[in-house]
Image (tube, grey):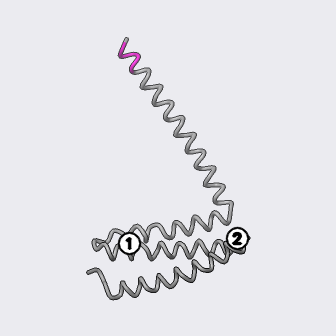
Amino acid sequence: MKKFVLITCSVLFVLCTTHNAMANKETIMKSMHNEQTNPMMSDYMAAMDKMHKPMMDGIKNHNPDIAFIKGMIPHHQGAIDMAKIELKYGKDPKTKALAEEIIKSQEKEIALMKQWLETHKDK
């Protein structure tokens, strides 16, 4: 009897878990469809996707200083890309002005970091 109850509970658990996973998958798929049909969201997702791998690859360097710089360059580029999206879609003048400032400051910092990397190649 105990074995029967244990098996029944296990089967019910698996069925409930599978049902929840399928429902969650459907929610995720609907969300992805909405992102793909919204040009602004598509642009933001593309900017984030473009930034993520180079940033993660950069921080894998054995030298902590180089890892920091190599991670920050794509991070700053991601900020620039997002600021350009704000300029493209945004309506608020203050937010658009902030986006312009972010572009200017992040471009300067990227140039400084690239210059630093040139003098500190994988030490």
The amino acid pointed to by label 1 is: Gly
Residue annotated with mark 1: 58
Residue annotated with mark 2: 90
Could you tell me which residue is drawn at 46 percent across and 28 percent down?
13
* Direction from residue 64 to residue 108 in the image, left or right: right
Q: How many marks?
A: 2
Label 2 environment density (alpha carbons within 10 Å; few <14, some 14–19, many ≥20): some
Q: Quadrant of the C terminus?
A: bottom left
- The quadrant holding residue 84 is bottom right
The circle on residue 7 is none
List x then y, in percent, for residue 102.
57, 77
Could you tell me how far apart the alpha carbons at marks 2 and 1 are, in whole angstroms?
31 Å
Could you tell me which residue is drawn at 55 percent across and 40 percent down?
22
* Direction from residue 2 to residue 11 in the image, left or right: right
Could you tell me which residue is drawn at 43 percent across and 70 percent down?
55
- The answer to whether 26 is drawn above or below residue 79 in the figure is above
List x then y, in percent, for residue 1.
37, 11
Along the polypeptide, which appears first: circle 2 or circle 1?
1
Could you tell me which residue is drawn at 43 percent across and 22 percent down?
9
List x then y, in percent, for residue 79.
54, 73
Q: Main secondary structure of the magenta part?
A: helix
Q: Nearer the viewer, mark 2 or mark 1?
A: 2
Label 1 environment density (alpha carbons within 10 Å; few <14, some 14–19, many ≥20): some
The amino acid pointed to by label 2 is: Gly
Start-end of magenta stretch: 2-6
List x then y, in percent, for residue 63.
28, 74
> Can residue 108 be found in the magenta stretch?
no
| Kind of element beneath mark 1 | helix
Q: Nearer the viewer, residue 63 or 38?
A: 63
- The quadrant holding residue 112 is bottom left
